[in-house]
Amino acid sequence: MAPSKKHSNTKAATSKPPVSAPPSSPNWPAFRPLVPPSDLSLETLLSSQIVLIRNFWTGKLCRDYVSFLKTLPLVTTPGKPKKGDAVRVNDRFQINDEGFAKRLWEETGLRGLILGGVESADEAGEGMSESERKQLWGGEVIGLNPSIRIYRYSKGQFFDCHYDESNHLSLSNIPVKTTWTLLLYLTSSSTGCQGGETVFYPDEIVIPGKKSVVEEPIVVGLETGMVLLHKHGNDCMLHEGREVIDGEKWVIRTDLCVKKEKSRFGE
């Protein structure tokens, strides 16, 4: 069933950095071993809304990163959110790290997949022109949001229904805005994590003279090493991270950044 109307005004989830002094950049492990870019592909789950990259990271690389991420100073989010915010209960670490974002963009084959510069079974972008890719991603993608967020959901933790908002920032001195959320799952049922699925709720379809049609929720189960991309901002679908029943759900979060186009008024 679709969520009740009370979720329709759920405040967008923000990704603003913490007020406290930013931590120093972690000594991130190397991206080894990696899947050859030619073996990666974009898979459309919902046109113009949800795209998957299965087996983006190898199981070994995911295990190595989980071991490393456990050493970071994660902070548990408050169980009682501010008025209007969605309830989120997890442990998280956030840092502004352009170097890591650049490595994730350039060293993993992600850049070629998004921009079409690699030959692969690219289901989501097969035969697409440059202009069509720009339309899909919301503009000219030039990299990833340097705001890197690490999430750990333990048993009983979850993220209630919410929207992800678009953010405006500067990337290598270029004004950009974020258009798609990127979630990299490091654990799944194969590593002992039960639950924690990401669920999207389509809008009601209103047909004149007929009852409103509510489509079934789209449930994305966890897969170790899989990337989930979903559109955010004004076109973001209502979604949630279901409660983890057992084990731990580890996620690396960032966003696609597109170059901001100047308006005809010069703004």
Image (cartoon, rainbow, N blue to C red):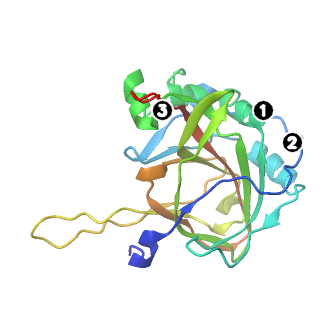
Q: Amino acid at mark 2?
A: Ser
Check disc 3 and report the residue beneath it.
267
Mark 3 or mark 1, earlier in chain: 1
- The reply to whether the C-beta atoms of the residues labelled 3 and 2 are less than 8 Å apart is no
Measured as percent of width and height from the top left, residue 229 is found at 53, 46
Cα separation, mark 3 vs mark 2, equals 34 Å
Q: Residue at x 52, y 34 (%)?
A: 41
Mark 2 or mark 1, earlier in chain: 2
Judged left or right of residue 58, residue 122 is left
Check disc 2 and report the residue beneath it.
25
Q: Amino acid at mark 3?
A: Glu
Q: Amino acid at mark 1?
A: Gly
Taking 191 as reference, is 210 above or below it? below
Q: Residue at x 84, y 49 (%)?
A: 22
SS at circle 3: loop
Q: Residue at x 75, y 35 (%)?
A: 98
Taking 251 as reference, is 118 above or below it? above
Judged left or right of residue 149, residue 209 is left
Quarter of the figure with residue 1? bottom left
Check disc 1 and report the residue beneath it.
99
